[in-house]
Amino acid sequence: MARPPLGGLLALALLAGCATGAPDEIGSTSTADRGVMPAATAPRCEELPDEVVPAGADALPPLTLACLGPGPDVSLDRLTGRPTLVNLWATWCLPCREEMPLLQEAFVRYGQDVRFLGVDTQDSPEGAASLVSDLGIGYPHVLDPDGELLSALGVRGLPVTLAIDEGGRIVARSVGELDAQELQQLIETLTS
């Protein structure tokens, strides 16, 4: 009796492992339904309110970072007016790359209520723009080539995700790759 080809068995095993979760949860939709967009350029950064958050342990530092796409530079101490999810990442960070589609899915689902901002850390603008485009990421990103925000937060590794309330205060943080449940909890912290 002939043995089935190994490649066919692997493909079958991969397909058998693909199950969907509840449709109202992050991570439960297929790639085609995640709102992944073919991006020719990086998304535009928005104008921010004039209000500056007073310095403190629960505030972002007064760093102004260049937008990866079109739009103004972003002053991190002006992320006020609506809840914001800030994700620090790099092209060379595999866990960062793995969680980006999940963040994109959350952006599609919650982007009307929560501002999303990616912070590309210690990378070239060309590499960052290429990854954002390749993955079809639709939320804006800023460039932190020297890793100033990472240093200011006192964190050594990536990815880092921060939940920022409407007043510009850090209300939750996650260090390491997010899973769907952790991301859902951060979103709920911002929207409840």
Image: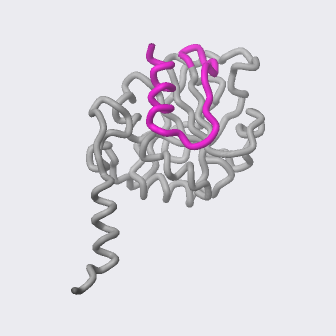
Where 144 falls versus 192 (above or below)? below
Looking at the figure, which quarter contains the N terminus? bottom left
Looking at the figure, which quarter contains the C terminus? top left
When asked about the image quadrant of residue 119, the answer is top right
Q: Position of residue 74 (x, y in %)?
A: 59, 34
Q: Position of residue 152 (x, y in %)?
A: 76, 34
**Residue that lies at the very extreme toward the left in this rendered image:** 1
Which residue does the image show at 37% across and 25% down from the upper left?
112
> Residue 182 in magenta?
yes
Please give the range of residues in magenta.
165-192
Q: Position of residue 148 (x, y in %)?
A: 74, 41
Which residue does the image show at 55% across and 20% down from the upper left?
49
Question: In this figure, what is the number of numbered marks?
Answer: 0
Q: Position of residue 71 (x, y in %)?
A: 50, 39
Which residue does the image show at 34% across and 69% down from the upper left?
10
**Residue that lies at the very extreme toward the front in this rendered image:** 1
Report the colour scheme.
one colour
Frontmost residue, 110 versus 75? 110
> Residue 179 in magenta?
yes
Which residue does the image show at 51% across and 16% down from the upper left?
81
Q: Is residue 43 left or right of residue 33?
A: right
Frontmost residue, 45 versus 26? 26
